[in-house]
Image: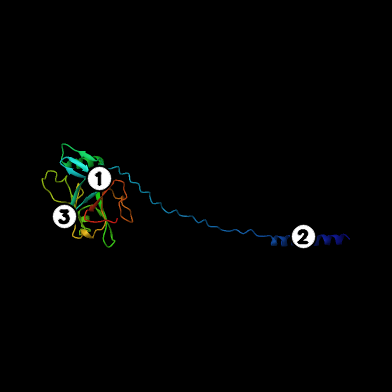
Amino acid sequence: MKKILTVSLVLFLCCGCSFKKEAEKNEPVEQKTNVKKIEEKEEPKVPEYIDDNQIKVALYDRSNNVLTLQKDFNGAINIKKDITTYQVFFSNEETLTYQGAKFGEYYHNTFAELNPERKYKVGFNLSYTLNDGTKISQNIFNPSTTQTNYDYIEVYLYDSYKHRNDSFYSHIEENEYNDETEITSIKLTAGSKFNDITSKIKLTVFTYDEDDFDEETKEYRGVSSYSLYISDINKTYTE
């Protein structure tokens, strides 16, 4: 009897081991997954454009030592005849009177005070529409940029400071333009195709540095500017 119990016990233990091993086989195996973190690269942010230029600028008529702020021009315009001349000055006052200096010196001294590091320059824009619907927007920085669209509007730039001691002087030529040139005035003349212009002409003067122009449109986007419109009394405008 004792021998039978012993055999039974051995058989039970063996069966128990087998059962345990089989159970272990059937246990779910925890799967390890290697999840790679995808790091999102942030696109570099384009710096927000901010113009901190505090210079005021406008277009004036000069008579002796008095400057008078100019508004829209409306008069008879004839082919190959001068339309008008504007003096550039760094103000928005209606009237300015200066004493003890010629205009070129007054301009130079004022701009030097407002722009001691010579960071800013003076530029212009002419915009208008032609009879075929073409829209013109012409930035003018120097004599070479006056030649574009010359048949519609002739543009001449002057440096009154360089010629402050001359009784007569001509417009700035490209071969004499340099970093020392100061554009003190602009003259507009009706070109040979002036009558192809069907809209009023918008003239803008501005002071600028290198980042003051939209990267796509190339239009001035700064805050230091002044605009007026030029129209011919012989024309009827729809815009």
Three-letter code, disc 1: Ala
| Residue carrying label 1 | 58
Residue 155 in which image quadrant = bottom left
Three-letter code, disc 2: Gly
Label 1: how many residues lie within 10 Å, few (<14), some (14-19) or many (20+)? many
Left/right of residue 96 with respect to residue 38 in the rendered view: left
Determine the residue located farthest toward the left in the rendered image. 167
Residue 47 got which mark? none
* Percent of width and height locating residue 78: 17, 56
Q: Residue at x 23, y 49 (%)?
A: 73
* Colour scheme: rainbow
Q: Quadrant of the C terminus?
A: bottom left
| Chain-order first, disc 1 or disc 2 | 2
Left/right of residue 60 with respect to residue 52 in the rendered view: left
Mark 1 and 2 residues: CB-CB less than 8 Å, in contact? no
| Residue carrying label 2 | 16
| Chain-order first, disc 2 or disc 3 | 2
* Percent of width and height locating residue 11: 80, 62
